[in-house]
């Protein structure tokens, strides 16, 4: 299966034999997978990257697996979650649904497992329909109340950079962007983030999610006023 865009999967499994097997299965299907057998490491990874899917094998510790999914989905409700369990956990499916996760019972075959993964994933990001334009000197804004700079824009969204302090707490999946100099505030949704090697700042891309037609019109007017040339010299970043 060829997936036309990157899908990030975090797989938490404490069985040393099962971990590489399932990671390999998912990678062969085209997913970008990080595997770990350590609960604390999983929490750190979830804080550093915006995964599309969290898979937890509750052979670890049932309550810890559920708590991890519940907390992560509270912080990032757009992320899908899947629990792998055994018939020895008779209430697994009910408890999985309570924390917003799907449930896969062992043993399972490759086809049914990958079909479940595909069904649970969020929809793909929208394709950009208008040119991206560079903001040559940057545009000072606030992203979810954190100071930031917008470096490129399109009708559908924008690219931005924010100070390292923004990593102190998870950035909401949908947030307000305030452009004080223009008296404009728009709703947007995170599409990707990266940590810049040199400064530790957050670099990211967001899609416009504003429903007010007047505000959308003002945003498009801003984009139209910018000279039309692609951004160059993008900073060296670690994808996250």
Image (spheres, rainbow, N blue to C red):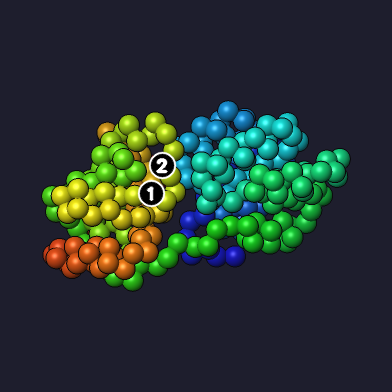
Q: State the mark number for residue 175.
A: 1
**Residue 27 in the image: x percent, y percent?**
59, 52
Label 2 crowd (10 A; few <14 / some 14-19 / many >=20): some
What residue is rendered at 64% in x and 61% in y? 119
Image-quadrant location for residue 35: top right
Question: Could you say whether the residue bearing mark 1 is in a helix, strand or loop?
Answer: strand
- Please name whichever residue, 58 or 78, is drawn nearer the observer in this view of the structure: 78
Residue 79 in the image: x percent, y percent? Answer: 54, 50
User: Do we see residue 45 in this rendering?
Assistant: yes
Give the residue drawn at x 38%, y 60%.
209
Left-right relation of 198 to 85: left
User: Is there CB contact under 8 Å for labels 1 and 2?
Assistant: yes
Q: Is residue 149 left or right of residue 64?
A: left
Q: Looking at the image, which is closer to me, 227 or 18?
A: 227
Query: Could one spot residue 232 in this view of the protein?
Result: no
Q: Is 182 on the left or on the right of 114, as rendered?
A: left
Binning the other alpha carbons within 10 Å of mark 1 as few (below 14), some (14 to 19) or many (20 upward) gives: some
Where residue 171 is drawn, which disc sits there? 2
């Amino acid at each position: 299966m060829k997936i036309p865009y990157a899908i990030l999967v975090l797989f938490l499994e404490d069985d040393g034999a099962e971990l590489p097997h399932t990671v390999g299965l998912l990678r062969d299907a085209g997913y970008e997978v990080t595997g770990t057998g350590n609960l604390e490491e999983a929490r750190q990874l979830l804080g550093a990257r915006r995964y599309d899917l969290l898979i937890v094998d509750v052979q670890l510790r049932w309550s810890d697996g559920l708590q991890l999914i519940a907390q992560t989905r509270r912080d990032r409700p757009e992320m899908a979650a899947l629990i792998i369990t055994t018939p020895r956990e008779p209430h697994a499916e009910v408890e999985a649904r309570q924390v917003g996760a799907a449930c896969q019972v062992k043993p399972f075959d490759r086809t049914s497992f990958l079909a479940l993964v595909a069904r649970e994933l969020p929809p793909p990001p929208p394709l950009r329909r208008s040119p991206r334009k560079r903001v040559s000197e940057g545009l000072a804004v606030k992203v979810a109340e954190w100071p930031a700079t917008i470096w490129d824009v399109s009708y559908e969204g924008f690219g931005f950079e924010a100070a390292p302090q923004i990593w102190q707490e998870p950035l909401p999946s949908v947030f307000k962007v305030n452009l004080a100099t223009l008296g404009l505030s728009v709703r947007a949704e995170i599409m990707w983030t990266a940590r810049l090697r040199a400064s530790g700042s957050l670099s990211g891309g967001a899609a416009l999610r504003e429903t007010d037609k007047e505000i959308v019109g003002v945003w498009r007017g801003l984009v139209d006023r910018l000279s039309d040339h692609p951004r160059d010299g993008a900073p060296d970043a670690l994808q996250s």
